[in-house]
Image (cartoon, rainbow, N blue to C red):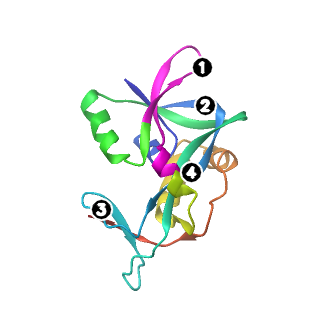
Amino acid sequence: MRLFAYGSLVARGGERVMLSGHRRCWGVAMDNALALPGYKRYAEPQSGAHPAVHVAFLDLAPDPAAHVEGVLIDVGARELAALDARERNYVRAVLALAGGGRAWTYLGSPDGRARGRRRPVVVQRAYLEAVRGAYASLGPGAVTRFDSSTDPPPGPVVALVREDL
């Protein structure tokens, strides 16, 4: 099975591909006011306080004039199940690839996208830097292509420390 990665999963490497008809957006968020066992939460580095914000993550949005660079990752059933659990703000969907192939990807769930429209919303700086770093590893121009195919963050980019619950 193959998985199209367009955000943090690009760091796993794989075959570089372009997905036409989409752009990257910050369309998914989690509610940082909630402490959900088995999930994550973000704290301010100085105070340790958990700000009552919605932390946004990347998603795909239809856009006939755009395309998104990503990677195709080969995954087995066990790894795909683990990713399904990790990507709890997303649903796994099938994409039709140029040339007739198909791949799985993760698209924002209805609840995850609803949280992405709530304010205040922020982007965790370390997440954005990790995604841009993953694209930098794809070679010259990949970060520029990432930036040009990604909507601007919907709120401030802030330093928050991830805490796994």
Quick one: label 2, few (<14), some, or many (20+) residues within 10 Å?
some
Residue at 62 percent across and 60 percent down: it is 153
Name the residue beneath numbered marker 2: 18
Give whichever of discs 4 and 3 has the lower sequence position: 4
Q: Quarter of the image for the N terminus: give it.
A: top left
Q: Quarter of the image for the C terminus: give it.
A: bottom left
Task: Decide: is 84 above or below 3.
Answer: below
Name the residue beneath numbered marker 4: 27
Image quadrant where residue 60 sits: top right
Give whichever of discs 4 and 1 has the lower sequence position: 4
Residue at 60 percent across and 31 percent down: it is 18
Q: How many marks?
A: 4
What segment is highlighted magenta in the picture?
92-113
Q: Position of residue 160 (x, y in %)?
A: 44, 72
| CB-based contact (under 8 Å), mark 3 and mark 2 | no
- The reply to whether residue 14 is in sight is no
Name the residue beneath numbered marker 1: 98
